[in-house]
Amino acid sequence: MRATLSKTVFTILVVVLLILGAIAGYAWWRLNHHDAGYDAQHNAAVELKTLQESLDGSDLPAQSKEALGHDISDQLEALNRTAVEEARADHDAEKLTTSSAAARLDGSAKKLYVLSGTQGIDPDEQATLVSMAVSHWASARQLDGTLQQVADPKSAGSQSLASMTGLSRGDTFDASGLCPAASGDARASPSGASSNQGSASKDPDAEDSEGLSAVLTGLYRSTWAESYYQARSDVDHLPEDTTAYLGGSAAVHDAQLGQLRAGLGRHCSTIPQPQAAYSVSGTEETDPSGVLSDQAKHLAQQSLSVVRSEPAASGDATGARSWRAWGANSLALNTALAAQVDADVPALPGT
């Protein structure tokens, strides 16, 4: 009886010691081998809370302050709950003024974008941080009044975006690692692609991307619609602001399409080709800005899906070698185009 009791007590002690050892081992591992995604989200939460504290004490107009406050709250909810709870705002947070708010948001966008490139981060976590960075960049354009100027690659907003991602619209984009997946649209034959795009040999390690196919198809539809509306602008007596919007949207999408096709032509054996024509219904003819705004939102969503792609998340490539940079640029520009019509920047563009 006594021997049985001793064995029972001994077994219980062993189990307890094993549990305590496991807990201690996990605590040691957690302190010495931080999870990349958790750390990135924790640092993002610190930045967001610091920005929130600066915003609370700012002299921004009440409407702008409220809108930005709601966006930051939504962004914090998109992060790991524990990471947010453990994050503390920087007590040296600068007091925002109307004149300094845009620059502060640009700085925040750059920090969040850098965090999105953390080595080993999960693709979904990366996409979330890129989306937040773009939201801050676009909000800065609203505050400094340059949202309408993003089509100009020399504008302050475009320069800020290039500084954030390391990729300008005039840069040659490498486009390695991804190729468009087969889609319903017609695809060029290998020989046709070779004659139009130069080298058409497909990289053996390139992954097929449905999101990239959708981006190409969306760009084809947008550039066709822009050309259609521009050709009819005099006949339809479009307002000057609508005509200006059409020109800016066309400039952005023409540049995107050219940069993307040139890069893909060096790595992919085939790429989706545009249809002979796309349809425009009767209601669409009377609201070109609304149509193009909706297409910009669709392109923003597909651009973020490209950011989620494994080649974009698995390497440390930046700038002209990074799909993360191209996807973030596309997400930002299309978010800005949609916001010009809606007068609203979402907290998490592309989601």
Image (cartoon, rainbow, N blue to C red):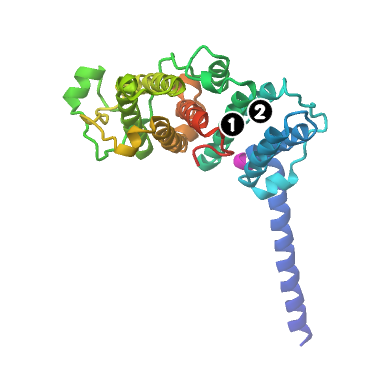
One can see residue 207 in this view: no
What percent of the width, then of the height, locates residue 291?
A: 39, 34
What percent of the width, then of the height, locates residue 273?
A: 24, 29
- Is there CB contact under 8 Å for labels 2 and 1? yes
Q: Nearer the viewer, residue 65 or 185?
A: 65
Seen from this angle, which residue lies furthest bottom?
Answer: 1
Answer few, some or many: residues within 10 Å of disc 2's Cα (few below 14, many 20 plus, some between 14 and 19).
many
Asked which quadrant contains residue 89, the reply is top right
At 77% from the left edge and 40% from the top edge, which residue is drawn?
A: 88
- Residue identified by numbered label 1: 133
Q: Nearer the viewer, residue 2 or 30?
A: 30
At 60% from the left edge and 41% from the top edge, which residue is drawn?
A: 37
Q: Nearer the viewer, residue 98 or 320?
A: 98
Find the magenta span and give its range.
35-39
Q: Amino acid at mark 2?
A: Ser
- Residue identified by numbered label 2: 108
- Residue 206 lies left or right of residue 85; in this view the side is left
Task: Name the image quarter holding the N terminus.
Answer: bottom right
Q: Could you tell me which secondary element the residue under label 2 belongs to?
A: helix
- Residue 279 lies left or right of residue 322; in this view the side is left
Asked which quadrant contains residue 176, the reply is top left
Q: CA distance from mark 2 to mark 1?
A: 7 Å
Q: Amino acid at mark 1?
A: Ala
Q: How many marks?
A: 2
